[in-house]
Image (tube, helix red, strand yellow):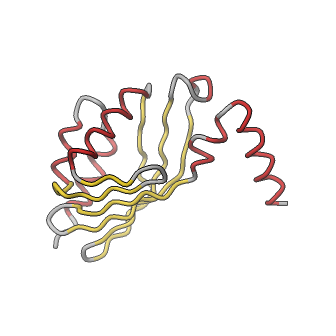
Amino acid sequence: MTTAVVDDFCRIYQGLDKNNLSRLGLVYSDDINFIDALHNLKGLEQLTAYFSHLYENVVYCNFHIEEVIKEKGKASIIWTMKYAHPKINKGAPILVNGCSHLKFNDKIYYHRDFLDMGQMLYEQLPLLGGVIRAVKKRVAS
């Protein structure tokens, strides 16, 4: 089991956009299990459709890889995502910190993302955002 697939994953995600989603097949197995806070997708076809829909609706979405931790057959990637959506935060850029846990052999067959949905979405909404931020501030003090 080589960790080269992890390096390829990082390169692909740092340049991913709606025009090159076919590159996902270079690192993901056909039976990929992709899990994030809102989805549990099975298979490369579902994952590609999800990303196609995602990139259709954002102005841009970029990943900056902060750290990569590799072991035999698994890896964790710490990242910051910067995205802009015309209907969220008045189209202004949003930064989201997250981590991806990968399991792989020749290709990645398991991908789970961990991120703060408040940071990504809920805090960006006009009414709900203020409430979420106030709750977080109160809990932290």
Which image quarter holds the N terminus? Answer: bottom left
Q: Name the residue located 71 percent from the left edge and 38 percent from the top edge.
A: 129
Residue 93's image quarter? top right
Tell me if residue 67 comes above or below residue 26 in the rendering. Answer: below
Q: Name the residue located 24 percent from the left edge and 29 percent from the top edge.
A: 19
116 vs 64, nearest the viewer = 116
Tell me if residue 95 comes above or below residue 57 in the rendering. Answer: below
Tell me if residue 38 comes above or below residue 85 in the rendering. Answer: below
- The x, y position of residue 79, in whole percent, is 45, 53
- The x, y position of residue 103, in whole percent, is 28, 68
- The x, y position of residue 44, in whole percent, is 21, 49
Q: Is residue 87 left or right of residue 108?
A: right
26 vs 8, nearest the viewer = 26
Q: Is residue 97 left or right of residue 26?
A: right
139 vs 10, nearest the viewer = 139
Q: Name the residue located 58 percent from the left edge and 27 percent from the top edge.
A: 92
- The x, y position of residue 126, in whole percent, is 70, 30
Which image quarter holds the C terminus? Answer: bottom right
Point out the residue furthest to the bottom here: 72
* Number of marks in picture: 0
Q: Name the residue located 28 percent from the left edge and 46 percent from the top edge.
A: 47
Tell me if residue 77 comes above or below residue 129 in the rendering. Answer: below
Q: Is residue 23 left or right of residue 74?
A: left
